[in-house]
Amino acid sequence: MTIPQPEPFGTMPDGSAIEVFTLTNCHGLRLRAMTYGAVVLSLETPDRAGRMGDVMLGHHTLEDYLRDPSFQGTVAGRYANRIAHARFTLDGQTYTLAANNHPSGIACALHGGLKGFDKAVWKAEGLSRDDAQGVRFRHLSPHGDEGYPGNLEVSITYWLTDTNEWKIEYESRTDQATPVNLTQHAYFNLKGEGCGDILDHSLTIHASRFTPVSAGLIPTGELRAVAGTALDFTKPNVIGARIGADDEQLRFAGGYDHNFVLDHADGDLTLAACVHEPVSGRVMEVLTTEPGMQFYTGNFLTGEHCGKSGSHYHYRHGFCLETQHFPDSPNQPGFPTTILRPGETRRSTTIYRFRTA
């Protein structure tokens, strides 16, 4: 396979040039990703009739991404998801973060802060191997960045394989103990971006437990069974079937915005979820080595921002399946640790695999 080459995509306000890489496979799938935020701009896959369609929400221009606060297609870090009260204590020292999110008026740090990895300009290089094209993004987050300790080196590689997989490989190193939790914040609509809501998609999540949240969308520390609740997706269920149920968890989040405790040992690459859209026939499977996955139904999309097709992205026009460690883990001793220490390398893998049915 040929090595993807960078092309210009715009200029940052400080004059930094932003580049885009286009990955293709032997079946015609195409993924485009840029150096701003390591954002995936588009992902084109066929429906059951072989018609290609872009299944990822996003924008045409860099300026649109700079204006949109919804993290479309970005890498979230240093810490994806929420940290309670925007602070944590590590090795006896308390660290204060930017309180950039206030669910129900309760402050927290969200997705890395005011200028997280989603707003960084990453270094990138195209890659190739016999069965895939790829792009590797690198970023150095300096000590004190958004309040976090340690110089953190991060590498994220996207592969588009001939087996119709978007494979993401994460790698992190630090010179001082620090929490690290990275994810890809892609919004999907398997009908095609701009084609309405995602409530008719059928979803299976291989998780018998979830982490219930308080009104501030912070986990309580409990690992609760999904059985008998509106969050039970252990068998295929239409996303919209119970999203309006009289359930405290759904009221807190305005729909689904919850971390699921996956039914596999941390470190094993196994199937976490499967989504089927009946009209297009598209199926997306999610595999990961992470212990958790956030299922989010676009509850905060407002319709203010126009997407690639010219349609505005309204309430529940996209869904996210964000593989991750659990929210607020630095403050939750019962959760799997997110602390990375000097001399260690944190690696994880997530795959989004596409087919039709």
Image (tube, rainbow, N blue to C red):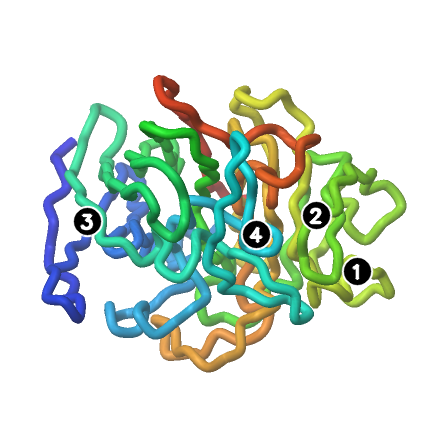
**Viewport quadrant of the N terminus:** top left
Real-space Cα separation, disc 1 to disc 3, in angstroms: 39 Å
Real-space Cα separation, disc 2 to disc 1, in angstroms: 21 Å
Crowd around label 4: few <14 · some 14–19 · many ≥20 (10 Å): many
**Viewport quadrant of the C terminus:** top right
The residue labelled by disc 1 is: 242
Rendered image: mark on residue 21: 3
Q: Is mark 4 on a helix, strand or loop?
A: strand
Location of residue 78 in the rendering, given as x and y in whole percent from the top left corner: 41, 44
Q: Is mark 3 on a helix, strand or loop?
A: strand
- The mark that comes first in sequence, 3 or 2, is 3
Real-space Cα separation, disc 4 to disc 3, in angstroms: 30 Å
Q: Which quarter of the figure has residue 170?
A: top left
Crowd around label 1: few <14 · some 14–19 · many ≥20 (10 Å): some
- The mark that comes first in sequence, 2 or 4, is 4
Residue toward you, 254 or 13: 13
Q: Which quarter of the figure has residue 39?
A: bottom left
Location of residue 269 in the rendering, given as x and y in whole percent from the top left corner: 52, 23
- Work out whether residue 287 can be spotted: no
Residue name at image x 31 percent, y 38 percent: 158
Between disc 4 and disc 1, the foreground one is 4
Rendered image: mark on residue 82: 4
Q: Is mark 2 on a helix, strand or loop?
A: loop
Between disc 2 and disc 1, the foreground one is 2
